[in-house]
Image (tube, rainbow, N blue to C red):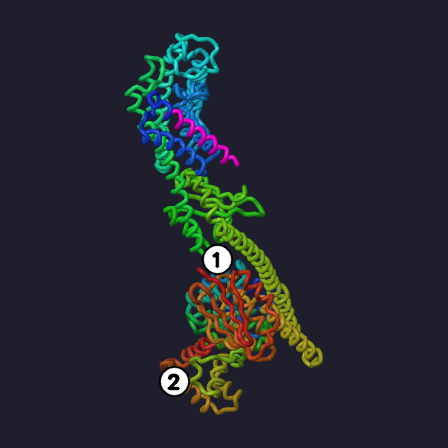
Amino acid sequence: MLRVVVWTVALAAAAVTVAIVREDPGDSLAGDSVIGLTAEVAAGLLLMAAALVTRLSGAFRVLAAFAAVAWLLVEWNSPGTGAAFTVGLVLFAAWPPLLAHAALRYRTRSLSRPAIALLALGYVNSLLVLGVGSALFFDPVEQGCLACPVNHLLAAAHPEVVHDLGRVGLSIAAVWSAAFVGLALAGLAHATSTRRRVEMPVVLPATAAVALFGARALHGSTRGFVSNDPTDRRLWPAQVAALALVAAGLLWERLRARRMRGELARLVVELGHSPPPGGLRDRLAETFGDPSLQLLHARDDVSGWLDGDGRPAELPKDPDRHVTRLLAGGRELAALVHRPGLFEDPALAGEVADAALLALEHERLNAIRRNQLESLRASRARIVATADAERRLLERDLHDGAQQCLATVAVGIRLARRQVASGDEGLDAELGAAEEGLREALGELRELAHGLIPSVLAHEGLGPALEALADRSPRLVVREIPAERFAAAVESAAYFVVAESLRRSGDGDVAVSARRDNGRLLIDLETANDSVGSTTDLEDRVGAVGGTLTRTAHQLSVELPCES
Amino acid sequence: MRVVIADDEALLRDGLARLLEDAGFEVVGRCGDAEQLLRMVDKRRPDVAVVDIRMPPNNTDDGLVAAQEIRRRHPGIGALVLSHHLEPHYAMRLLEEVPERAGYLLKERVSDIAVLADALHRIHEGECVVDPTIVSRLVARKRGRGPLDVLTEREREVLALIAEGLSNTAIGERMFLSPKTVEAHISQIFMKLDLRPGPDQHRRVLAVLAYLRAS
């Protein structure tokens, strides 16, 4: 709706301008050349179109649209204008401050103090000094323009005031233009290279247009008004061209953004529905040519970030690493950590978020899922580690406590037996039986302690522990065992899977082979019958160290990561 | 025979000392941890050290480590490790480096003075002794292919008895064989296990090691 209104205003202004110039080409800037008139009107309409299609901030678009309309009013202060003459008198110099304002707001969120002061001066000078101020005292008939329409703002005819205001206003306009050119060029000079590359196509022609206006103001400052003398007419086409270039620069930026968006969209399509973990990061790094680019995902349970593998990550404090947040629906979705200057164009980050929205969501959910799985695994690992520590403690207590006591008692009984008077064979036999009982108890305690956690597992490793298990249970056939040591958690997980499977497999043989292969410990168990039963607890143990357990009828296969 | 006893349980240590003294051994030292043991052995030069596997400071296998150290430092001094663990791997560790004059018995033998005395004498004579319970477990074991596959069932039984520390005569009595037959079996075993000719005791020890390694 707004677009329709804006276009109606712009087209109406253009139509009026065409009518004015055609009516009185001699008093116009465009003159009687059709090309000149077409170029003049087209430049304004082009700027309007560019302002409407660009995806930049609202303030910039409004300013650019106003500048476009104001541009179309420059011919309205000529005698052929008719009813719109007063509008032309007030607004004929409005476009330079508007265009300058738009250029300073191009891709920036705020204005510096000098910029605000300069713009204020420009508006006041153009609208109040050269515009309303002059119009209040300008009587066209009095000043010799018999063909001029009526000035509806005329309060009192004071030609000398109009002349002074014109001279002062145009002098200020010339100085103001020079100041703006300096400010704009200094801004470009101090910008990063990326930013400069993005801003130049728009800011440079806008600066040129304002500079040309300044030149014409200087040219007119002695006589007190801007005219269409030969010098003006020579400068005018350059001014038209500069404005057209501003519009072209905006359209070019828009095209560039679209192309980037297209590239992003293609990249997202290439990634498919299930990109590999970190796949999006790699493609973004490639697309933007920053191998150090990091993609971090926003967590949704707590505030914070996750990397592609679901590990918690921090945004960098390093000033050499910049962070650009990607938003979708007002919500932070992801953050790109990159080299400085990569996303200084704020629209680009928006393009990335738009184009890669699905892939970003997908990766983010994956990262969150991985994070949850990892915390689950860590919690399982803690439970298992606690249980193992308890077992070790119990095993030690059995050896150091109960077994030592029993052994001491056994020695005591043996000493007592030596003092039994010879002939008291009944007592000696009873003591002998007690001794035998103690020996059995010691044997049972030893087996109990070993069943809790074999000390050979901690001291000698998985291979010897499995051998020891086979020594105790002849049903276990050891086919292959690794000679090397693994992390304690991996060794105990592997051992317990074998020991438990053996315990649950009834009276059939169990064959085990364990070997290291490519950073993993592989354990294959073959059972004669399918009676191992539920393996949930074994899966817990294996899962606690990040491993997997798969089983078929007579086979149990365990894979444990054991990167050393 | 002069022995030292190392066990962190004082009551057990003293009881064992009295038993051994009654059986005719001269107990020249008692101590409760591995460091003391090593110092005592250096100073008093016993014939054999009787060592509990679990001792301070770590209470894991400190006794075994100390026994290995004694065997390294003093080739003439024997070491008998008393252990809670049935695993042949601990026995292996003790015998691997210096296979003579070493023994590994389960802790419950401590009151069986006849077995203990016999083991100490064998160790003093240069043999190695492994607890019969461990050896019988090894015999019962189902195994894949190994160096012992070349032996006959009979020869394997003889080898198991050698590992327990039995003399040829004792093996003959146990298996109802004549000493000549036992000797024939033993020389077959030595040949099949590719044990080079040498002092007979030494080859017996190597055969035991081969047996343990095959487990």
Residue A89 in which image quadrant: top left
**Secondary structure at numbered mark 1:** loop
Q: On the image, numbered disc 2 is attached to which residue?
A: B191
Q: What range is drawn magenta here?
A: A1-21
Residue B13, how many percent across, how many down?
58, 66
Q: Is residue A228 left or right of residue A327?
A: left
| Residue shown at the point (49%, 61%) measured from the top left | A487
Q: Mark number for residue A274? A: 1
- Amino acid type, label 1: Ser
For this rendering, which residue is in front, B71 or A473?
Answer: A473
Residue A248 in which image quadrant: top left
**Disc 1 chain ID:** A
State whether residue A54 is above or below residue A386.
Answer: above
Do the residues under discs 1 and 2 have CB atoms within 8 angstroms?
no
Residue A515, how many percent across, how many down?
45, 69
For this rendering, which residue is in front, B97 or B69?
Answer: B97
| Residue shown at the point (43%, 15%) measured from the top left | A129
**Secondary structure at numbered mark 2:** helix
Q: Is residue A176 left or right of residue A545?
A: left
**What's the distance in space between the residues labelled 1 and 2, CA to CA?**
66 Å
- Amino acid type, label 2: Met
Tell me the chief SS of the magenta region.
helix
Do we see residue B9 in this rendering?
no
Instruction: Determine if the magenta segment contains residue B32.
Output: no
For this rendering, which residue is in front, B50 or B131?
Answer: B131
| Residue shown at the point (38%, 10%) measured from the top left | A143
Residue A194, how many percent across, how many down?
36, 38
Q: Is residue A431 left or right of residue A275?
A: right
**Disc 2 chain ID:** B
